Image: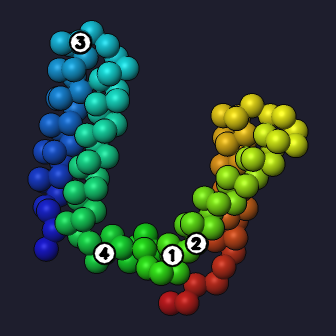
């Protein structure tokens, strides 16, 4: 049995309060945003691990799912490096373009695959 939804909501509220205090005490909206992002990520990881079986099943974290994720990341990197080296694109723009371009093909492929329910 994982964490209750009330406990998770309280952890997210604590993350928001910590970010607000960071903004007030340091007078930096960027530090507050990064604090909120980091703490929200930690809450999400804790929540996901508290429901480990359900989380791993829904995310497809099994030997086949890990291979698919690895293939996705590698294809993004290869396409971005081709754009950088062949077309002389800027690095950040190439990886952004690659993420959206390759991601759209993977997403379309996932949508048209038949489900085995």
Q: Position of residue 90 (x, y in %)?
A: 75, 31
Residue 65: mark in rendering: 1
Element assignment for label 4: helix
Residue 68: mark in rendering: 2
Image marks 3 and 4: residues in contact by CB distance under 8 Å: no
User: How many numbered markers are drawn?
Assistant: 4
Q: Quadrant of the N terminus?
A: bottom left
Label 3 vs 1, first from the N-terminus = 3
Left or right: 74, with 39 as reference point: right
Image marks 3 and 1: residues in contact by CB distance under 8 Å: no
Q: Position of residue 33 (x, y in %)?
A: 34, 27
Density class for disc 3 (Cα within 10 Å; few <14, some 14-19, many ≥20) is few
Position of residue 98 relative to residue 107, above or below, is: above
- Residue at mark 4: 54
Label 3 vs 4, first from the N-terminus = 3
Position of residue 19 relative to residue 11, above or below, is: above
Image marks 1 and 2: residues in contact by CB distance under 8 Å: yes
Q: Position of residue 46 (x, y in %)?
A: 22, 57
Q: CA distance from mark 3 to mark 2?
A: 42 Å
Element assignment for label 2: helix
Q: Quadrant of residue 10?
A: top left
Q: CA distance from mark 1 to mark 2?
A: 5 Å
State which mark lies toward you, 2 or 4. 2
Element assignment for label 1: helix
Label 2 vs 4, first from the N-terminus = 4
Image marks 3 and 2: residues in contact by CB distance under 8 Å: no
């Amino acid at each position: 049995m994982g964490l209750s939804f009330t406990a998770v909501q309280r952890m997210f509220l604590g993350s928001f309060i910590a970010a607000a205090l960071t903004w007030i005490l340091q007078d930096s909206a960027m530090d507050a945003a990064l604090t909120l992002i980091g703490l929200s990520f930690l809450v999400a990881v804790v929540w996901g691990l508290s429901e480990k079986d359900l989380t791993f099943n829904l995310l497809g974290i099994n030997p086949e799912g890990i291979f698919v994720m690895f293939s996705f990341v590698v294809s993004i990197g290869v396409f971005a490096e081709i754009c950088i080296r062949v077309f002389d694109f800027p690095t950040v723009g190439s990886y952004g373009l690659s993420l959206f371009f390759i991601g759209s093909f993977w997403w379309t492929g996932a949508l048209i695959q038949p489900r085995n329910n």
